[in-house]
Image: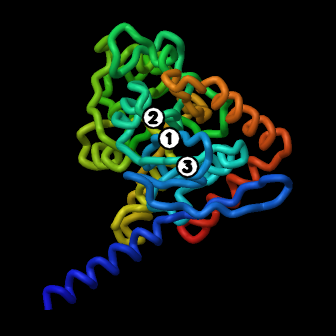
């Protein structure tokens, strides 16, 4: 009986793993090809027979990218596509964000994504007397979303569009995230009190439990984080309806790749990524690609 149980568990686990192997379409020599994924170390591999294989580290950050989305998100699909079209092999691993940053800053990964814009004076989280941009090189931008102060509907907060107007509020932020340059400077200087969460879903619960009056987030990411939870549909809709982004937003945040300068070929990798971003943007394909890949997973959740 025990042997049968072990076999059933093995079959179930194998089927589960296979269901997570997301194919990616890309274009080579004007032909649409499909690359199938393989389980590779603690992540996913594509075109692993290529001469140059790049390791990427990322996080669960729906609706942009998430290991449990039906296609792992439009940014996952786009990233693999861009690199395959440049002839690279791809190895992607998912981590909590602070761990992903560490892997990249220490040169254990070649590409960190998605990142917000990083100013030249932003210090490394892991190496003393080093800035992030001394260790990692920013790519050309991709579309992102609005970063806002988010609160619960009905909460009375005197927000006039400036950070100064909410300096006395207790604010929730995600560990390791870069917000806006001004906000991060005030937090670092101790002029704004914060509670740190590990992800957006925890941020929402900080609000619901009234431990903070504001959180800093992309509202679309908050909604997507609720959608992927185990709550009932009624509970999800109720939670989403309770959230409101204060206007105006703090900043529109583009998304970027950051390439590790520890890789001797980092400039070639960065050039390849930027070339593909330029081409897909100029052709008008990018907007349609984002819409299509997003709707694949979210068309029935609105």
Which quadrant of the structure image shows residue 83? top right
Q: Is residue 197 left or right of residue 238?
A: left
Question: Looking at this rendering, what residue extends furthest in the top direction?
Answer: 129
Question: Looking at this rendering, what residue extends furthest in the left direction?
Answer: 2
C-alpha gap between disc 2 and disc 3: 20 Å
Which residue matches tag 1?
56
- x and y percentages locating residue 148 in the rendered image: 50, 35
* Label ID, residue 152: none
Residue beneath the point at 67% across and 48% down: 84
Q: Nearer the viewer, mark 2 or mark 3?
A: 2
> Which quadrant of the rendered structure holds the C terminus?
bottom right
Visible residue check, residue 214: no
Which quadrant of the structure image shows residue 191? top left
Tag 2's secondary structure? loop
Visible residue check, residue 35: yes
C-alpha gap between disc 3 and disc 1: 15 Å
- x and y percentages locating residue 193 in the rendered image: 28, 23
- x and y percentages locating residue 68 in the rendered image: 45, 61
Q: Which of marks 2 and 1 precedes in the sequence?
A: 1
Which quadrant of the structure image shows residue 1? bottom left
Q: Is residue 130 left or right of residue 287?
A: left
Q: Is residue 99 left or right of residue 240?
A: left
Which residue matches tag 3?
64
**Disc 1 to disc 2: CB gap under 8 Å:** yes
* Label ID, residue 109: 2
Q: Residues within 10 Å of mark 3 (few under 14, many from 20)?
A: many
Tag 1's secondary structure? strand
- x and y percentages locating residue 172 in the rendered image: 33, 34
Nearer the observer, 47 or 93: 47
Q: Nearer the viewer, mark 3 or mark 1?
A: 1
Residue beneath the point at 84% across and 53% down: 29
């Amino acid at each position: 009986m025990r042997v049968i149980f072990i076999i059933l568990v093995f079959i179930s686990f194998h089927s589960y793993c296979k269901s997570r192997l997301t194919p990616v379409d890309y274009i080579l020599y004007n032909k649409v090809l499909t690359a199938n994924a393989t389980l590779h170390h603690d992540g996913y591999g594509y075109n692993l027979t290529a001469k140059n294989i790049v390791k990427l580290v990322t996080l669960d950050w729906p609706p942009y990218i998430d290991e449990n989305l039906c296609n792992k998100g439009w940014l996952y699909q786009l990233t693999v596509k861009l690199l395959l079209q440049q002839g690279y092999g791809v190895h992607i691993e998912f981590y909590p964000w602070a761990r992903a940053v560490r892997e990249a800053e220490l040169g254990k990964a070649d590409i960190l994504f998605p990142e917000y814009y990083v100013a030249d004076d932003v210090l490394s989280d892991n190496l003393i007397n080093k800035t992030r941009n001394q260790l990692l090189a920013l790519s050309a931008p991709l579309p992102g979303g609005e970063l806002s102060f988010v609160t619960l509907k009905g909460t009375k907060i005197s927000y006039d569009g400036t950070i100064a107007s909410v300096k006395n509020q207790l604010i929730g932020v995600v560990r390791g995230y870069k917000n806006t340059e001004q906000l991060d400077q005030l937090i670092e200087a101790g002029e704004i009190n914060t509670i740190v969460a590990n992800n957006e879903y925890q941020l929402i619960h900080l609000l619901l439990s009234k431990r903070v009056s504001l959180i800093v987030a992309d509202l679309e990411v908050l909604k997507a984080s609720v959608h992927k939870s185990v709550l009932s549909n009624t509970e999800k809709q109720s939670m989403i309806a309770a959230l409101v982004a204060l206007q105006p937003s703090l900043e529109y945040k583009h998304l970027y790749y950051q390439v590790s300068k520890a890789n001797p070929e980092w400039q070639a990798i960065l050039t390849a990524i930027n070339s593909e971003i330029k081409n897909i943007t100029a052709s008008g394909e990018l907007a349609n690609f984002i819409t299509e890949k997003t709707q694949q997973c979210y068309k029935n959740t609105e």
